[in-house]
Amino acid sequence: MTDFIDIGSVTDIPVQGARIVRTAHGDIAVFHTASGHFYAVDEYLEGKAGPLSNGIQHGEKVTDPMRNWVFDLATGEAQGADEGCVGTYEMKVEDGRLLLSSAAIAGQVAAE
Amino acid sequence: MTQKLIIIGAGMATGRALEQLIEADPNAYDVTLFNAEPRGNYNRIMLSPVLSGEKTYEEIVTHSAEWYEENGVTCRFGERVANVDRARKVVIAENGEELPYDKLMFGTGSNPFIIPMLGHDLEGVIAYRDLEDTELMMSMNETNKVVVIGGGLLGLEAAAGMAARGVDVTVVHIMGHLMERQLDEAAGYLLRKALVDKGITVRCQANSKQILGENGKVRALQLDDGTELPCDLLVMAVGIRPNVKLAQDIGLAVGKGIHVDDQMLTSDADILAVGECVEHDGAIFGLVAPLYDQAKVAAKTLLDEPATFVQREISTKLKVTGCDLFSAGDFAEGEDREDIVFRDPARGVYRRLVLQSNKVIGAVMYGDTADSNWFFGLIKDATDVSDMRDTLIFGPAYQGGTPMDPLAAVAALPDDAEICGCNGISKGQIIAAINGGADTLDAVKATSKAGSSCGSCVGLVTQVLGLTLGDEFKMPEKETICKCSDLSHDDVRKLIIAKELKSIPHVMQDLDWKSPGGCHVCRPALNYYLVCAWPGEEVDDGKSRFINERVHANIQKDGTYSVVPRMLGGITTPKELRAIADVADKFKVPTVKVTGGQRIDLLGVKKEDLPAIWYDLGEAGMMSGQAYAKGLRTVKTCVGTDHCRFGTQDSTGLGIKIESEMWGAWSPHKFKLAVTGCPRNCAEATCKDLGIICVDSGYQILVGGAAGLDLLEAQLLVTVPTEEEAIEVSCAFYQLYREGAQYLHRPYKWIAKVGLDWVKEQVADDLENRAALAERFRYSQKFYQVDPWAERARKGVDSHEFTPLADFTKVAAE
């Protein structure tokens, strides 16, 4: 069973906004899309894209501000001709709180 | 065998009937057309634009002498019909000539009602009915006073038309508010305010007593409270009466008008009647839409084809520039009726819907009539609106609906929507040109002038062609804004204004966006177009801006940011330099560099530190240099007459003034300026978006330079003698670019598209337009000259952008 850690309130991220969660292993970008969904993906695709939390969101996608790669927030896959995939993490919303899978954080902590 | 048809009266109804008849069967009748006016059919409802000078008589002629000749119509213009002998089926002309007929059609129209008060027969007392009346009103000028009796549609159009010519006009209206048959009190009030702003004096609840004259000529109108309103001309526009005299004389059934049945036949089966002279089912008609319906039916009846005239809902629009009002249906209050009202006093907008049994039965709109056609449709179709009641008043964009076809946005525009801003050509005029045979874009340009100046409306003109001609017209491929839409940048910009779209979701809904939330290409473009179109309204959506404009700093390749404070004209002080040095130390800024635009750049700043750095810089009096913006960047200067022995003018001072006036503005792309004190050009003004070269006699203003991917020398726009004019031209040019250029096009690209000559016409030659552009720029600046750094460093705006949501790195370290 997956453990979850409270990372904040749903109101901490405006609609179509994104914020980062810092972990020892790197930043995770948490997105709040226009449809009301939340997604957690890696802030950077090493050497290729990021910081994704700075991108423009559209639908359930985000465009990287540096090279205009478009990533699907649910799968982490780069769209179109670009090839690559950012890590995605399980998230859920309960009672207005944002919960991120502890594996996303603890796993990386454990790797130390 | 060809039958003989005689028509009495060449007006809009008989004209349309004639067209329909000839189109269906040109050989069915041998037609003779009598008209008491010494001319053929013209578009009577367009007399108001003729009066105001927006059109000429020639432009409103619907049937020329050639048209009548080509279609074999025998014209007897300037001749009245003296009598009709129904038993022998002959018409007797004024000169006694007898003409036999098989069918006779009455189109005798209406007579203006003249209040039979004392003095109504004085010279200078007229109605507003035909070209002669219009010409008399057109002969008035700034030195004349005119009184108009009647605050209805016609009276107000007459008043506004003369006021546009500088005439001192007073409207006298007996009722409590203007246009009481079409408007409720609130809308009447807004209309009155707009007319007063145009310099028209309005007196409501004013009862006319008598007309005073001198030497047989009108001198003044006296009200029953004794007030005298002096005038050189008195126009009575208090209503019309169907002209039934001849019909009555020859024994046709007549009430208020000539009685007709659903086939437009009078009580004599060989005599038809159409237009303002008829009475159908108790109603008489004054607006053009039902007259055209009657004409259609009459033509079919003449050809022995079945057709039925049905009275339908009619709507009213006032043809006065700057007064947008719309009224349709029934808007009286009643116990079983409910109102939905929306008001926006700042914009002078008023909307009211009257509902009965969950259906809209009436609508009154003032100031914002963009959705009027949609509301009118709800009334006509008696749509049940219970499901959309909550958002109904906001219009169609706020209703869930079926996706539209790509042409729907243009199809939904009313005929009077302006398509070509340069030449003031409406959608209706373009359609008229197309119907007149112009079936290609070039032909439309040649005949209507639409799209022939700056060319930015060509996309919309093409769509009107597509809509009007249907499958006969092949839509050319065009560059669309992005893959989310079939519209071009220019189309989108014009539709945002024409349809008054004020948010990105609204634009996407109304213009049939193909993706749910757009993409990174269209979202920033749309956001800019909204910001430019609606200054002062909360249209700016930070989430649609590129990161630099969202956090007001330039993102660097490692995810850090650069910070550039504004230094007006490139002038700084020891105090500012100390503050910059202090923040560089305090926040361990790795690189401090002087930029190409004469500013100082702090590079390598962490995102979290931005608000704190801005706070410190703000303490020293500095604000954002907006070095990240698609907007006004920098004004470079040389030292000019302050220090330089070659300087001809105070180039530094002018640069500071220009930058003070222009900072904060957003534009399609970045905009860089320079002011140099002499032709030696130390400030490098000749490769800027706008450069000013000071010379002994004044200021040369150059535009469209580039020194990036493309290298282009700026070209001379105009030379002006004073600083004030140099600033005015700079603002006007920037505004023209802001309003016209495609997003991400620098001025040189835009100029290549519209042509420098056109830009010169707009900014250099047309002084009125120059002033209007500069005024619009200054208005916009009222809202955008806000230091974004101060808002974020001191007021906590967008604080979520600068701090992590959570930080688990410390947890890990423990």
Image (spheres, coloured by chain):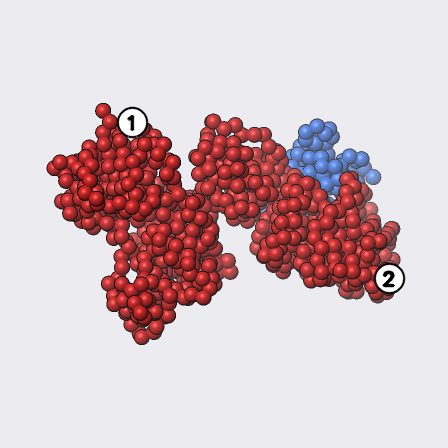
Quadrant hosting residue B261: top left
Quadrant hosting residue B187: bottom left
Mark 2 and mark 1: Cα distance apart in space: 87 Å
Write the residue at 39% across / 43% down: B61
Quadrant where the N terminus of chain B sits is: top left
The chain displayed red equals B
Write the residue at 24% across / 46% down: B80
Kind of residue at disc 2 = Cys
Q: Is residue B78 left or right of residue A70?
A: left
Residue B814: image x %, image y %?
82, 48
**Residue B583 versus residue B489 in the image, above or below:** below
Query: Residue extending furthest left?
Result: B87
> Total label count?
2
- The chain identifier of the residue carrying mark 2 reads B
Helix, strand or loop at mark 2 = loop
Quadrant hosting residue B792: bottom right
**Disc 2: CA contacts within 10 A as few (<14), some (14-19) or many (>=20):** few
Instruction: Give the residue number, with chain letter if any, for mark 1.
Output: B27
Q: Is residue A51 left or right of residue B119?
A: right
Residue B23: image x %, image y %?
34, 30
**Which numbered circle lies on residue B644?**
2
Kind of residue at disc 1 = Asn
The chain displayed blue equals A
Residue A110: image x %, image y %?
79, 39
Helix, strand or loop at mark 1 = loop
Question: Looking at the image, is mark 2 or mark 1 earlier in the sequence?
Answer: 1
- The chain identifier of the residue carrying mark 1 reads B
Write the residue at 34% across / 42% down: B40
Query: Residue extending furthest top?
Result: B1
Can residue B382 be seen here?
Answer: no
**Residue A9 versus residue B214 in the image, above or below:** above
